[in-house]
Image (cartoon, grey):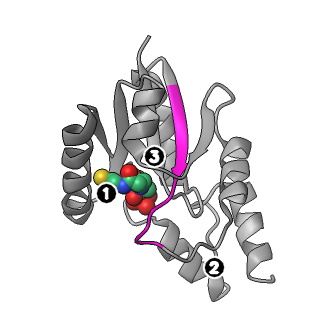
Amino acid sequence: MTKAICPGSFDPVTCGHLDIFRRAQALFDDVTVLVTGNPDKNTGLFSVQERVELIREVVDPSVKVDYWSGLLVDYTTAHGADALVKGLRSSLDYEYELPMAQMNRHLSGIDTVFLLTNEKLGYVSSSLCKQVASFGGDVSGLLPDPVVAAIKEKFGE
Ligand code: PNS
């Protein structure tokens, strides 16, 4: 039984994230999407509870969704995870992810498996979608439909 954790801030979850979760399911028996605190991203548009609920609404029912406010490797060790899974859109993502993957491996021995983002979604990020939506731009097809509805509500549309 292989177990993977897909960690992230997911503020909010995008279609790119969903694609990574689906592909993680093809590689691992058990997949948990973990909403975790990123101390470098102080201001969230969605509360942690809202992020968790939106993810639950759009992922395959066999995927678990959880929240953790502590050190990521404390969660992975406590839950007996075999690997972390993250998406890579570009070399910039690689530069950002590499030290975290190496730190997590140093702290607990856990490996990070990187999946290359779907080539059609390489420009999609939660931050850019929030910015576009805040100006009334159309983010349908980039965010799952319930998330598009939720983001419109946030920006009073
Ligand atoms: O989606 P993000 O914001 O790029 O994900 C980064 C995240 C949340 C996975 C990372 O900040 C994290 O693991 N936070 C939990 C605290 C922690 O363990 N920090 C040390 C990471 S090496």
| Residue with the mark numbered 2 | 133
| Residue with the mark numbered 3 | 7
Ligand 1 rendered quadrant:
bottom left
Disc 1 or 3, which lies upstream in sequence? 3
Q: Magenta span has 37? A: yes
Q: Is residue 126 left or right of residue 135?
A: left
10 Å crowding of disc 2: few (<14), some (14-19), many (20+): some
Q: Which residues are magenta?
A: 31-41
| Residue with the mark numbered 1 | 89
Disc 3 or 2, which lies upstream in sequence? 3
Q: Is residue 121 visible?
A: no
- Coordinates of residue 37 in the picture (x, y in percent): 50, 59
- Coordinates of residue 100 in the picture (x, y in percent): 26, 53
Residue 20 quadrant = top left
Disc 2 or 1, which lies upstream in sequence? 1
Residue 59 quadrant = top right
Give the CA distance from mark 2 to mark 1. Answer: 21 Å
Residue 115 quadrant = top left
Q: Secondary structure at mark 2?
A: helix
Of badges 1 and 3, the one in the foreground is 3
Q: Is residue 114 left or right of residue 134?
A: left
Q: Is residue 69 left or right of residue 148?
A: left
Disc 3 residue lies near ligand 1 with CB under 8 A: yes
- Coordinates of residue 88 in the picture (x, y in percent): 30, 52
Give the CA distance from mark 3 to mark 2. Answer: 24 Å
Say above or below: 91 vs 130. above
Q: Secondary structure at mark 3?
A: strand
